[in-house]
Image: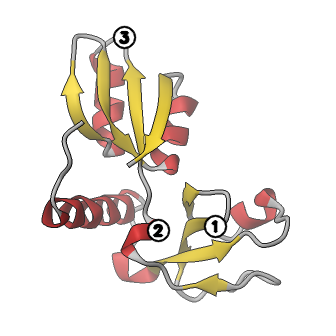
Amino acid sequence: MKKHNKTWTRLIFLLCIISVALSKNSSAADFVYKKILLTQPINLVNIESYVNEILVVEPNFMIVKINKNTVIPGISLSPTKESDFIQRRVDIYFQDKQQLAHILKAGVDIFHKTKQKIVGRAFDAQIKQLEALGLTIFVGDNL
């Protein structure tokens, strides 16, 4: 698979942040991305009640989109780094133009498209959103 330079990666990163922020019909300035270290067991349902979106879930941390004034009791929120925004390689299978439109609207970074399959990369939140719509997705390595 072809490697992209840092400028391309940063551009994709910024576009993802902007599209996710705008998709919630809120001002981008109202939300921030924060890192939650997973050093102890955390009740995911409790976290979901405070955050707008869980963008990335890794074994040691998660990245959440949260209102800048929100405090989660008992949870320490840390600043994020660009390297925290991990995307996964995905193969997404679709049946029709409507499903393809959902994939495009979700903001998946597309490397290759065939008649019924997209190869690309996506954040965990995008994968979860598309799976909820019934799309078949095979997740590969982190990119």
Q: How many labels does the image show?
A: 3
Residue 136 visible, this angle: yes
Q: Distance between the residues labelled 3 and 1?
A: 34 Å
**Mark 1: secondary structure:** strand
Q: Residue 84 carries which label?
A: 2
Residue occupying image coordinates x 37% and y 56%:
23
| Residue 106 figure quarter | top left
The quadrant where residue 90 appears: top left
Residue that label 3 marks: 95
Q: Is mark 2 on a helix, strand or loop?
A: helix
Q: What residue type is labelled 2?
A: Asp
Q: Give the mark nearest the N terminus, 3 or 1.
A: 1
Residue 47, horizontal then vertical, whole percent: 73, 66
Q: How many angstroms separate mark 3 from mark 2 (CA)? A: 33 Å
- Residue 67 rendering spot, x and y as whole percentages: 54, 79
Q: What's under tag 1, amino acid-wise?
A: Phe
User: What kind of residue is marked 3?
Assistant: Gln
Residue 20, percent across and down?
38, 59
- The circle on residue 61 is 1
- Give the left or right position of residue 6, taking residue 77 as reference: left
How far across and how far down the image is residue 127, in percent? 49, 39
Residue placed at 49% from the left, 26% from the top? 138
Q: Which residue is drawn at 23% across and 58% down?
A: 12
- Residue mark closest to the camera, 3 vs 2: 2
Q: In this view, does 76 lie to the left or right of 22?
A: right
